[in-house]
Amino acid sequence: MPPTQQPPPVQRVRIRYTKRGRLRFTSHRDIGRAFERAVRRAGLPVSYSSGFNPHPRLSYAGAAPTGSASEAEYMEVALASPCDPDAVREALNAAMPPGLDVVDAVTAASGALADRLQASCWTIRLPGVTTGDAERATAAFLATDAVQVTRMTKRGLRHFDARAAVVSLRTGEAFDPASADPAQPCAILQAVVRHGEPSVRPDDVLAGLREVAGLEASAAPVMQRLAQGPLDPRDGTVGDPLAPDRDTRDA
Amino acid sequence: MPATSSARSLWSRLEPLLPLVSKPIQYVGGELNATPKDWDAATVRWALMYPDAYEVGLPNQGVAILYEVLNEQDWALAERTYAVFPDMERVMREHDIPQFTVDGHRPVGDFDLLGISFSTELGYTNMLTALDLAGIPLHSADRTDAHPVVIAGGHAAFNPEPIADFVDAAVLGDGEEVVLAISALVREWKDQGRPGGRDELLMRLAASGGVYVPRFYDVEHLPDGRIQRVVPNRSGVPWRVAKHTLMDLDAWPYPKKPLVPLAETVHERFSVEIFRGCTRGCRFCQAGMITRPVRERSITTIGDMVDNGIKKSGFEEVGLLSLSSADHSEIAAVAKGLGDRYEGTDVSLSLPSTRVDAFNITLANEFSRNGRRSGLTFAPEGGSERMRKVINKMVTEEDLIRTVAAAYSQGWRQVKLYFMCGLPTETDEDVLQIADLAKRVIATGREVSGRGDIRCTVSIGGFVPKPHTPFQWAGQLDHQSTDVRLAKLRDALRCDKRYGRAIGFRYHDGKPGIIEGLLSRGDRRVGRVIEQVWRDGGRFDGWSEHFSYDRWVAAADQALAGEPVDLDWFTTRQRDYAEVLPWDHLDAGLDRDWLWEDWQDALDPDGREVEDCRWTPCYDCGVCPQMNTEIQVGPTGKQLLPLSVV
C-alpha cells in the first residue's frame, strides 16, 4: 500500500515561546516532542508530512542551548485549514507545560523566519562575581580584536573566535534578586551576539572572558535569551522578527 | 518519619548544579498531568520510587497508578523519585543534597512512607543509593521514628528476603486497594498521636494480614545451610502473608491522567492494561503464576481509557498491555473498534509480543491500517518442540511456520522471535534447533512474498528460575554453559550464507542472569552480598555498562565467607520437595503441591500438558479458593462506538 500523499499546508503560523524556570533544562529534542503532543492535544488542524510515517509539520529556528532560559524562541506550525493565530496561541499555550509558554503568534507572510534571526540579546548571571571584576573583564574582552575559545561539539573539539560576534557587552547589577543568597555578589552581563557559523553562544563569551581576564563564577552561570531577531546596524539592537508578518497583516 | 511538617524544597540548591550533570531534564519534574499538592494539607505522605533511571521509571504503570490513586485522596499526597545517575550522585554527595522527589524537590526523608516498586531484582543496589542519599539508615533495624517507613512492592516483592534487612515491609500483588488501606492505617496512627512509635505502626501493618514485615519473622537454618523454618517472633503476626488481588478492573481505570514527560523515555506511548493475570501456564513465567486469576477490562472501559488517554496525553501510540494481549475474550472487537475509530488519524495501536497464532496476524493488520507493516514479534520461547513441551508452551513448528507465512504474505517484512536458553533439561540440540527454525522462517517468507528482503531477528535471553513457579526448584544453567550454547547457536545461524544476513541474532552473555538468579531465589543472607556490592560501587545493575559480574562474585565470596552457602548454592543447585524455600511463608495463592506436580510433569517426557483454565476445567492451581477470587472474562457482546475524532 503506497503512503497517502498529504495536501500542502494552507497557512503557516509563526510562534514565539519561552523556556522559563526549571524548564530551561529542556533540550531542543524534548521541546520538539512536547509540541508534537501539544498540537494533538489542542486539536489543531495541523498539516502532516507525506510518507509512511507522517509527522506534523512543525519547524524550529535558532533554539537556545539546554540549560539556557529564553523569552524568545521561535517556531512555525503549518496548518491544513485556516485558523486565527490568537486561537492557535491560546490552544497551544493551554496544551504546553507551564514554563514552555506560547506568548505570540502571527500568520506568516513571506520570507523565511530563520533569515530574520540575525542576533540575540542575552543576560548572563554570574554568581560570586562583583561588578568591578565583571567590568574590568568585559573591558579587556572588548579591547581585543579576537579571542580564541574552544568548545566540545558533536564533531569534536572546535576552536573559534568568540570576539567578533559580540556586538555589545555591558555589566549590570551587582546583586541578584533571584539568588538564594541575596548577600552574595552577582554580576549580570548583557550581551548582544550576532548569529553566524560557527555560532557563538553566551558560554563561549564567558570562555572568552575567562581567557582574557580570568573571570570565574562561583557557581554555574545562568543565561537567558531576552530577544532574538534582526540586528539594527545603526544602534546594535535586536528587533522583533515577527514584525514583517504583523505589518503585512495590518496592511 | 519526621515529627514536624516540613515542606522545604531543595530546588534553589539543586538548580545551580543541574548544568553540571547529564540529561538534567530528568530531575526537574513538571510533567504534564503531574499533580503537585499542598504538603501541609495532607496527613499521609508517600514518596514513590522506581529504582531505575527516570527514563525507565517514568513510563512504569505501577508507580503511575499508585501516584494517581493516592493523590486523588485529599488527605494523602504522593511524589515520585527515581534513581539518579552516578554523575548526579557525585554532585549530590559533594553538595550535601539528599535524595529528592521530582514533583516538589522535597527530601525523601521528609515523607511518612517510601514505596519502592521492584519490577526486577536488579534495582536493589539503586535502592541502597537512594536510602543512603536520603539519610535513611540502610538497615531497617537502625531506623527511628524520624525516618520514613520503607515498603517494597512489585513482582520482585514476592520474594523480598534478599532485601529483608533494608525494607521495613513488603506488599505482594495489586497495589491499588492496599496502598489506600496502608495509608488509612498510617493516618489513624498519626491522628492518635503516633502511639508506640514506629514499632507499633509496623505491628499494626503486620497484623492487618496484608503487609509483610520481615523483622517480625525469624529465619532458622539447618547446619547445611538450608532453611529450617521461618516463624513469627511475636504474637498477632500471621504465619503467612497473602498477596492482594484487585477484582474489578473496570472500577479502577487508571491511569486516568497519564504522565507525559519532557524527557525522552523508553516507552513513548499511552498504555492501557486490557487484562491482568494469565493462566496459559508457561512454567517459567513468574508473572503468569503470581497474577492469577485472569481479570479482563471490558471492551467499553478499554475504549474509554484509550480515548481519554490520547486526549489527555497527546501520545500518538497506544499500547494494549497484558501478559498475552491476544487472549482477551473480545480482542477482535477491540482491534476492529479502535482501528475504525482511529483510521486516517496519526494514532497508532500496538500489542506487545504475542503468542504464535495466525489469528494474531489479523489483529496486527487491524492495528496497522495506515500501511505501516514494520515488524511483528512472537515468543515461542523454546527452540525445540520438546523444550516447548517442558515449559508448557505448546506451539508446533507447523503453527509457527503457518503464522509467519501469513505475516510475510500480508506485507510484513520483519519477524522477531523470542527464545530462552538454559531451560530445565535443555541440551545443545534443543537450542541449535532455533537456527533451523529461523532458516525455515526466512525460506518460507521468501517463498510466500516473492521478495528477498525478508528478515527475522532471533532474540534470546538466559532463563532465570523464579519463586512461585513450577521451576522454582530448578538448577540454573551456569554462565559458562550458557555462553557455549549461545556461541554454537550463533555459528549455526551464521554458517549458511543463504540466510546469514537475513537473520539477526541478539543475545546477552550468561553472567547477569546468574546474579539475577541469586537475587531472585536468595534468602536473607544475600542481603549482605547486595550491601557489599553497593559499598564496592555497584549501581544500575540492570545496565550492561554499569553491571560488573566480577564485583558481584567478589562480594558474594566476601559476604558469604564462613557460611555453608555460596553463589552456586543459590543459583545452579536444584532444590528438592522438602526444602523450605525462602518465600514459602509468602502466599501467592498457588498450591505448593500443584507447583511440584507441575515441575515433575515438566521433567517427565510423558508428563501432562496444562491447558488454560479459561477454556478448560480448573486444574487446581489453588489460587481462586485460596484468595477467594474467580476468573473474570467476557465476552460482554458490546461493541465500540465510533467517536468523533479531532
Image (cartoon, rainbow, N blue to C red):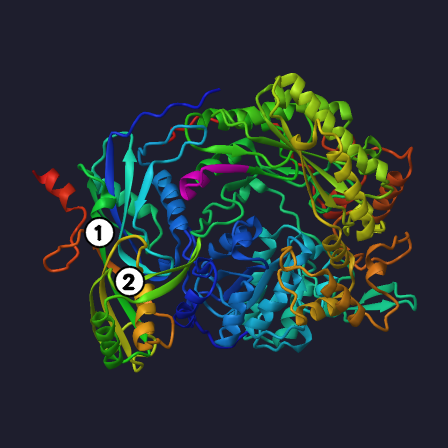
Amino acid type shown at disc 2:
Gln
Q: How many marks?
A: 2
- Is residue B300 part of the magenta span, yes or no? no
Quarter assignment of residue B242: bottom right
Is residue B528 among what the camera can see?
Answer: yes
The residue singled out by tag 2 in the image is A224
Q: Which image quarter is the C terminus of chain B in?
A: top left
Q: Is residue B315 magenta?
A: yes
**C-alpha gap between disc 1 and disc 2:** 17 Å
Q: Is residue A89 left or right of residue A246?
A: right
Q: Nearer the viewer, residue A137 or A173?
A: A137
| Chain bearing mark 2 | A
From the viewer's perspective, is A57 left or right of A243? right
Q: Which residue was labeled with disc 1?
A: A118
Q: Which mark is residue A228?
A: none
Q: Is residue B200 above or below residue B53?
A: below
Residue sitting nearer the eye, B600 or A185: A185
Subunit that carries the residue with mark 1: A
Q: Quadrant of residue B116?
A: bottom right
- Residue B156, percent from left and from top: 69, 55
Q: Earlier in the sequence, mark 1 or mark 2?
A: 1
In the rendered view, would you say B216 is above or below A88?
A: below
Figure quadrant of the N terminus of chain B: bottom right
Q: Are marks 1 and 2 on the same chain?
A: yes
Q: Residue at x 78, y 48 (%)?
A: B483
Q: Is residue B110 visible?
A: no
**Residue kind at label 1, given as amino acid type:** Gln
User: Residue B183, located in which quarter of the rendered image?
Assistant: bottom right
Q: Residue A22: x and y, percent? A: 37, 61
Q: Is residue A87 left or right of residue B102?
A: left
Tell me residue B561's x, y (percent). Answer: 83, 72
Magenta span of residues: B309-319
